[in-house]
Amino acid sequence: MIEVDSLSKSFKVAKRGAGIGAAVKSIFNPQYTTTKALDDVSFKINEGEIVGYIGPNGAGKSTTIKIISGILVPDSGKCNILGNTPWINRVSHVKNIGVVFGQRSQLWWDVPVIDSFNLLKDIYKIPEIAFNDNLELLTTTLDLSNLLSTPVRQLSLGQRMRCEIGASLLHNPKILFLDEPTIGLDAVSKIAVRNFIKTINKEKSVTVILTTHDMNDIEALAERIILIGKGQILLDGTLSELKSRFVNHKTVIVDFADNNDDIHIEGTTTISRSKERLTLSVDLERIKVSEVIGLLSDKLDILDVSIESRPIEEIIVDLYREYQI
């Protein structure tokens, strides 16, 4: 489906000091530094996968997306997407992909959304029947019916992002590139976008590459993550593998009938205790959560139990620290 092999890309960045003198000097004697955005990046993605492509700012995420969508040309390396090289076979390639950049718009600012959709229909040469079917599906699932007649500049950020995603899928692409699709969205809009991505992935087997700093998006959508840092692929695996590697404790919160007895279980640490609630940190390398609950049920009249895992954001921070990025 998507094969990326040894992609590299560098950028020249102008460098000068502050002040008028430095500005004049830079005109006659410009100074540049070279930044390596990608350094021998390789990965494969199969049909129907949702992959979280993560990393800190400046890691090379957006550069990768721009290269595999055909916007940028790499310095070296190969890329094969459905038989096309993105920066060479651009016309045939863009028929198979949809791209959403959270900070860019493909909709025309001063015209109603439906006019932008109709223009995209002509650009992609979408047959009338297919366009109407897709428009109906997108309007229903993304709740766009009240937005189509509104100029883009009058939409809220969440409304515009829903329209952007709809625009990127009008031509039935097999692959969807999402670069920060939920940036700045409220909770309701985020959930709507996530549910829609799950739906098109399940019903149409659309392959999704998602780059975002919102780890809740990754946890809600992606089964596989690729970590990039300093222009290099550092990790490629499933989210469950990542959790098993970095999560060695869980928190168990137990509500019970009034009880003042001392509770001590090997392999656990008491975080807090009252007459009716106990919060324990469980060392998973020493004891299973199910064993802890079983031992507690022998000692307490349990009313409710909740188990909390370590937040995904903390896991990713540890991952960044491990790779020093």
Image: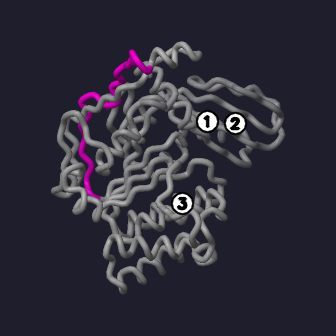
Residue at 50%, 51% in the rendered image: 104
- How far apart marks 2 and 1 lie (CA) works out to 7 Å
Say if 113 sits above or below 136 in the image. Answer: above
**Mark 2 Cα shell of 10 Å, populated few (<14), some (14-19), many (≥20):** few
Residue 194: x %, y % from top left:
52, 58
**Mark 1 Cα shell of 10 Å, populated few (<14), some (14-19), many (≥20):** some
Q: Is residue 220 visible?
A: no
Residue 102: x %, y % from top left:
51, 50
Label 1: which residue? 295
In the image, residue 31 lies in the stretch drawn in magenta: yes
Q: Which callout, 3 or 2, points at the residue further toward the start of the chain? A: 3
Q: Is residue 267 left or right of residue 134?
A: right
Q: Residue furthest bottom?
A: 129
Name the one closer to the observer, 225 or 38: 38
> Which residues lie in the magenta part?
27-47
Structure colour scheme: one colour
Label 3: which residue? 193
In the image, residue 225 lies in the stretch drawn in magenta: no
**Marks 2 and 1 in Cβ contact (< 8 Å):** yes
Question: What amino acid is found at the position of numbered circle 1 in the picture?
Answer: Leu
Q: Quadrant of residue 297?
A: top right
Q: Is residue 270 visible?
A: yes
Say if 216 sits above or below 6 in the image. Answer: below
Residue at 16%, 56% in the rendered image: 83
**Mark 3 Cα shell of 10 Å, populated few (<14), some (14-19), many (≥20):** many
Say if 196 sits above or below 228 in the image. Answer: below
Label 2: which residue? 299
Residue at 33%, 77% in the rendered image: 126
